[in-house]
Amino acid sequence: MGRSVNVLFSSEAIAARNAELANEIVALGCERLLVIAVLKGSFVFAADLIRALHAAGLAPEVEFVSLSSYRESTVSSGTVRIVHDIDSDVAGRDVLLVDDILESGRTLAFAKDLLAARGARRVLTCVLLEKPNKRAVRIEADLVGFECPDLFVVGYGMDVAHAYRELPFVGVVEVDPSES
């Protein structure tokens, strides 16, 4: 992909916000904290947030869940399914569900309800980006890194056609006018 990417949130701004989020999480008084990262888009954010939590004095356990509402399409089906589940028992524990973007809310609401039904003491949600005007279901994240304009973003773990995940910042792919 030979396109350039305009920086929306720099790596420095993201690192500073991760440290702030970690301090906000510490202030919530979590017990037996289990961080569950929603794959694939949140893996970089979750890794940096976990390190920030360590620096803030927490030692959470970590799990990964893979959920899909897209099947073979690029448009959400509206039905979320579990592609890969967690192994840990969440009963009686505080769970921090980490995702890359809160947009329609379907995936986050599904995961939050699932973990609550499995007996989690408390399920907190933390997203790197929030697009507040895109909700299809009623859910608000407990912790938000940044409010994001309604743009298709890449980098910092997020992709388009499996490209750009490696970028250390969140950006917008610049579209060449001749391609439109």
Image: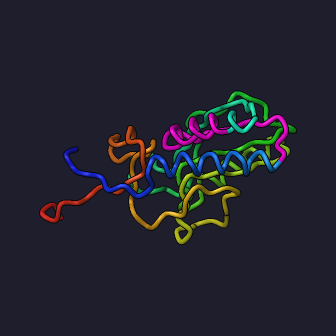
**Colouring mode (rainbow / by chain / secondary structure / one colour):** rainbow
Could you say which is closer to the camera, residue 65 or residue 2? 2
Residue 123: % across, % down: 76, 48
Q: In the figure, residue 159 lies in which quadrant?
A: top left
Chain part drawn in magenta: 29-52
Quick check: 113 above or below 55? Answer: below
Query: In the image as oriented, which residue stretches furthest toward the bottom?
Result: 133
Residue 22: % across, % down: 68, 45
Quick check: 54 above or below 154? Answer: above
Residue 92: % across, % down: 87, 38
Q: Is residue 46 magenta?
A: yes
Q: On the rendered structure, is 52 left or right of 167? A: right
Instruction: State the residue at coordinates (72%, 30%).
Output: 61
How many marks the image carries: the answer is 0
Q: On the rendered structure, is 161 left or right of 33? A: left
Residue 150: % across, % down: 44, 67
Q: Quadrant of the N terminus?
A: top left
Quick check: 8 above or below 164? Answer: below
Instruction: State the residue at coordinates (18%, 60%).
Output: 176
Q: Quadrant of the C terminus?
A: bottom left
Instruction: State the residue at coordinates (83%, 38%).
Output: 93
Query: In the image as oriented, which residue stretches furthest toward the top?
Result: 87
Q: In the figure, residue 132 lies in which quadrant?
A: bottom right
Q: Is residue 143 magenta?
A: no
